Image (spheres, helix red, strand yellow):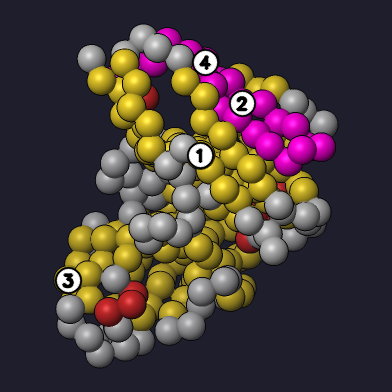
Amino acid sequence: KNQVEQSPQSLIILEGKNCTLQCNYTVSPFSNLRWYKQDTGRGPVSLTIMTFSENTKSNGRYTATLDADTKQSSLHITASQLSDSASYICVVSAGQTGANNLFFGTGTRLTVIP
Amino acid sequence: DAGITQSPRHKVTETGTPVTLRCHQTENHRYMYWYRQDPGHGLRLIHYSYGVKDTDKGEVSDGYSVSRSKTEDFLLTLESATSSQTSVYFCAISESINKNPRISPLHFGNGTRLTVT
């Protein structure tokens, strides 16, 4: 069964600290993995997209890694800011059928406190 | 932000009534999608569209229908709303056929919160 699991469910960190969010998946065949940020009351916004051949992708203070062998990805946030408070969603795309074959994790809720 | 507008942003309706949600885009993207987001679930695909009058079902399509008569508009209709359809509904778009949708990001609207009483 194609599944995407994220951990932890929620996380509270102090402003300025780093954190790492995890994503494990069982989606097959694998096409690409995406991380999205979703602010409260807003739609998700794309942070990174990684294909099978990419094992690291950065977007400012966000760095995503992918290990296609172990089917794991992580999102590392450096020097957190209050504006990083949001849900982070891992999404895995399967097979050849395009964006209509995406599997979404339930997200990690990150709260950054002063 | 990608030019995606969802309307209404909030709606409360009664069980058994029809409801139509609208998604309007200004990006001229070919692909459009309707998702629902519920606690404890990842986003789930309801219906999607490859182009004008070209639509297909997603994972949770029962009780929903869609129409796309113009590139910019994608409508989601609940023929007879039920309490299980209380959810937040997101419209998304992705790049035209000139870019592979497999590796192009989805751009989401800001959602419609629907409550069915």
**B61 versus B88 height, above or below:** below
Return the chain for callout 4: A
Give a yes or no on whether discs 2 and 4 share a subunit: yes
Which segment did they paint magenta? A59-83
Q: Residues within 10 Å of mark 2 (few under 14, many from 20)?
A: many
Mark 1 vs mark 3, foreground winner is 1
Q: Check disc 1 and give the amino acid type.
A: Ser
Give how far across and how far down residue B70 sits, in percent: 49, 67
Which residue is label 3 attached to?
B12
Which residue is label 2 attached to?
A64
Mark 2 vs mark 1, foreground winner is 1
Please state if A81 lies on the left or on the right of B49 as rendered.
left
**A57 versus B58 height, above or below:** above
Which residue is label 4 attached to?
A60
Of labels 1 and 4, earlier in sequence is 1
Return the chain for callout 3: B
Does dot 3 land on a helix, a strand or a loop? strand
Question: Label 3 near label 1: C-beta < 8 Å?
Answer: no
Q: Check disc 4 and give the amino acid type.
A: Gly
Give how far across and how far down residue B96 sits, in percent: 64, 50
Q: CA distance from mark 1 to mark 4?
A: 22 Å
For the C terminus of chain A, the quadrant is top left
Q: Residue at x 81, y 37 (%)?
A: A69
Q: Quadrant of residue A70?
A: top right
Give how far across and how far down residue A44 sits, in percent: 43, 43
Please state if B63 lies on the left or on the right of A22 as rendered.
left
Which residue is label 1 attached to?
A7
Does dot 1 land on a helix, a strand or a loop? strand
Mark 1 vs mark 4, foreground winner is 1
